[in-house]
Image (cartoon, grey):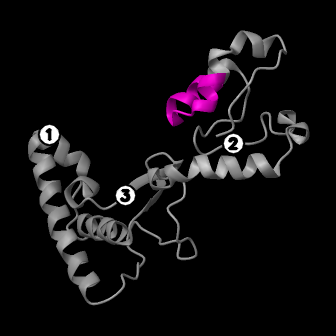
Amino acid sequence: MISSQTSWLLEIVNFNVENSQYVCAGHLNALDCLGNVLNFLKQQKIDMQKLMATLSLEEVKQRLSDIVSASAEKTRKKAAAGPVDLERGYATIPLKAIDVPFHSTFLRNGVRPFRGYLSKKILRSQINPSLLLNRYIPNVTAKPFSISREYIEEVHKLTGSPKLANVLNNWSRYQQGKPFRTNMN
């Protein structure tokens, strides 16, 4: 709602502990607004579960929209006075050493150039997926790395990677150990 009402980037980029701990990335104004919204909910003792039980979905959305609007205005005033400095809130802890919205859609346009860069630096003969199997847990899936078709399909669905589309389209050749041509760019 913050993102849609303000056009500021704000995304949950890591689900650490369900219903307890998430990592959000985005524009400083959006992160500040999120802190304002959550602080307001806590200060006013607004229980979202009770609201959902007593009001219609549309009424709950309208209440949240009003809270987001007020919080965004508070953030805009803060930003007009100078750079926004995120502060710890009741439910937010700024990660001040991180100044890039990692794992967000904002960085998606950098994937292709980064892939090209890595393809020049890492020799295909040096890649050993078995070192990663069931040991590496990528944020994109939050599941142990695998080279099964199901896993590749899931990652492709989440990322839309043309490289993975090529692997999936040539899966039978891949399974037979036959090389297939991929375009690194």
The residues colored magenta run 151-166
Q: Earlier in the sequence, mark 1 or mark 2?
A: 1
State the residue position of label 1.
57
Q: Which mark, residue 10?
A: 3
What secondary structure is the stretch in magenta mostly built from?
helix
**Closer to us: mark 1 or mark 3?**
3
**Closer to us: mark 1 or mark 2?**
2
Q: Report how far apart the C-alphas of labels 1 and 2 lie in the structure.
A: 36 Å
Q: Which mark, residue 137?
A: 2
- In the visual, does 98 lie left or right of 137? left
Q: Residue 137: give x, y in percent of width and height.
A: 69, 42
Q: Residue 18: give x, y in percent of width and height.
A: 48, 45
Q: Report how far apart the C-alphas of labels 1 and 3 lie in the structure.
A: 22 Å
Q: Earlier in the sequence, mark 3 or mark 2?
A: 3
Element on which disc 2 rests: loop
Q: Residue 14: give x, y in percent of width and height.
A: 52, 50
Q: Is residue 83 magenta?
A: no
* Vertical placement of residue 84 versus 153, above or below: below
Q: Do the residues labelled 1 and 2 touch (CB within 8 Å)?
A: no
